[in-house]
Image (cartoon, coloured by chain):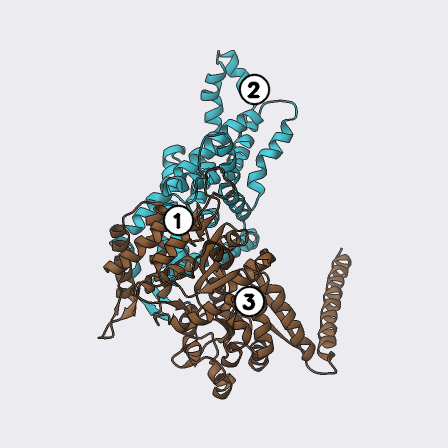
Chain colours: A brown, B cyan
Amino acid sequence: MKVKKLGSWISILAIMGLTLTACGSNKETKSNDAEGAKQVTIKIMSVSQTENPDGPAELEMAERYMKLHPEVKIEFIGVPMNDLYKKVTAMATAGDLPDAFTNTPQFIRTAYGMNITTDLTKLLGEDYLKAFYPNILEESSVDGKLQLLPWTAAPMALVYRGDWFEAEGLKAPENWDEFLDAAKKLTKDTNGDGKADQWGFGMIGTRNGSGADRFMTVLRSYGVDELKKDDSGKWITQLDTPEAKEAFQFYVDLNNKHGVVPPGVTETGFPEAASLMATGKVAMMLTGPNALGNIISQNPDLKGKLYSTPIPMKVKHTATFGVLGYSIAETSQHKEVVADYLKFMVNPENALAWNTVSGRLPTTIEVGKQQQMSTPEYAGFVKALEYAFSIPAFDQYSQFQDIIAEAYQSMIAGNQSVEQATKRATNRANEVIKNNK
Amino acid sequence: MLSSKSGFKGIWFILPAVLTLLVLITYPLIYGAYISFFDTNLITKWNFEGFRYYKEIFSNTEFLSRIILTLHYTVWVVAGHFVIGLGLSLILNMKLKGITVFRVILILPWLFPEVVVGLLWKWLFNPLYGLFNSVLMGWGIIDDPVSWLGDEKTAFVAVIVVSIWKGFPMVMMLILAGLQSISEDVYEAAKIDGCNRNKAFRFVTLPALMPVLLVTIILDTVWWFKHFTMIWILTQGGPGNATNVVSIDIFKQAFEFFNFGKASAMAILVFFVCWLMGYGYRRLLGNGDD
């Protein structure tokens, strides 16, 4: 019996030994690859990997880099944009962050507070960063330290069906009255069954950052700041002003009163709205240039038919920068290698190729001057960059997205009056401001 | 009486279970309670706040209204599970030809992952391409497509319907197992005593099922009170606050607003609500011994 037991133990140990030897030899083979150079694996958490056509295009770019640098292996971890901040937080808490991760100006202050991002100003050098638009660099920095390398900008603008507008003799809307007029004209019954099957505006009304950021640009076009510092440096909200109420009412009326929006607006997120545009159901949507790549990949016939123009104004045009880039984790053991790959991503050739595929705008000054940026598809986005506003440097800013989205949803789906909705929004906003330390 | 040697051996037998419980249940619970006293990002910031978040939660009616909404949701879902689950389990307990096939089919909703169920029903409810609108318009019941998940009145009902569909098989199977453990002899004895079918159900089946029903109702209530996944996929708590149950509020506090301390305080309070519900059920339906 004892002999049998001993035999079992010896067998287990032998198997374990063999397994470890196999692993060790595998590692050795790897490190001996590439003409004896040490193999470095970098892990990158990317939102592009979950999107089309961005994912395959990013993979292809990484493969080109790996061909040029056989000693580097790039592995991607895909994460949807809506889950990015949660995933980064969870991985940071567990001490398991990848070498680099997608980041946005909305999250950089939180990430900076967690001390999980490398100061890229120091790592990349100020000379190298001179090639970028200064306002985009500012948007991507906290306390003068660059938190993410801005890969693309996706300023919010109005994308519209240029061919439909021309057929109706409409001009790109300069203000909200013209916008409403165009939306009404383009809401139609195309198959003659007595019901509208084409709508003027593909409104994104979900209760998340995607929906809220869009309405925020409308709000700002009415001259309203959801959050700003007053002359004494104190944070205040203007959500209870008559201008704010007017903006909310106008936006909600597009659905509730004018009927220029397809049914189910509170369920319509970006993917749904882009699909509606791709299938010829809507004529306009507020979005970044990334929608162009998405829509055209769904319906290539729309190439050349989608135009862009800055967001219509009440008192001014506005836009968000929509900056997206990569942060290098403070814990990364391969910061220099990651930085080199990020530089490769934003070089002029790759930036233009990326713009062609994804529609997102480049972030360097020289590339921004290229011819392909002045086509009707992109001209509105490039122009919109002039009107872009910076996100308030407020730690709890994400709460304002929820506050605003709750307000318009309550008005759309719950028939709340604008007074009720903005009163609750203002109370919540003041509570957040009060609790901010 | 156990000798000290065999008592020592006994500790070794229970040690794996004790360690597992300590690591997987006790530690997270205590850590969650610990976090609730801090303003923290879980990495670099640990500012002690004492009972600030608890005071904040109790100082306005927001949290209470979420709890009431969640209770409202739970009551409807659990009632739906029990009505459908009990009815179907009684049918499945009959000796009918091919009943095994129905048992397999009826358990299918429970086997689908919650994410799949959420997406599936979201498509069914879609106002432009969804099956429900298409069928109802085809039958002439509605003239225009309805945004089931986009209206405060219908969204709450829609979420309850999906939750009932997803959860009834578990109740059905547990009750079926309970039914099958009741001896035929008891029914025969009841029949001899003059019981008809209804009386046998009332005086034999229900009392014999009571231990199973008690466990099932506690499990089902607590499970659906904490439910998150499908509601998040279907409505994200909207439109407005129509389906903003407490689990969604906690999730948002933690992972959208990064208020981990407040989220933990809310979770601790939910834990006590769940514990109270379990205690209440045992007092109401149990035999009083526990």
Q: Which residue is mark 1?
A: B238
The quarter of the rendered structure image containing the C terminus of chain A is bottom left
Instruction: Give the residue at x 45% y 26%.
Output: B207
Q: Amino acid at mark 3?
A: Ser
In front: mark 2 or mark 1? 1
Pointers 3 and 2 in contact (CB under 8 A)?
no
Residue B140 position within the rendered picture, expressed as x and y whole percent measured from the top left:
47, 30
| Between B8 and B288, the one nearer to me in the picture | B288
Residue A312 position within the rendered picture, expressed as x and y whole percent measured from the top left:
37, 62
Sequence-first tag of 2 and 1: 2
Give the alpha-carbon distance from disc 3 to disc 2, as whole Å: 65 Å
Which subunit holds the residue at mark 1? B
Give the alpha-carbon distance from disc 3 to disc 1, as whole Å: 28 Å
Residue B217 position within the rendered picture, expressed as x and y whole percent measured from the top left:
44, 37
In the rendered image, the vertical position of residue B257 relative to residue B140, given as above or below: below
Left or right for A313, reference A298: left
Residue A44 appears in the figure: no
Q: Amino acid at mark 2?
A: Asp
Residue B185, disc: 2
| Between B197 and A409, the one nearer to me in the picture | A409
Left or right for A212, reference B175: left
In front: mark 3 or mark 2? 3
In the rendered image, the vertical position of residue B175 relative to residue A102, given as above or below: above
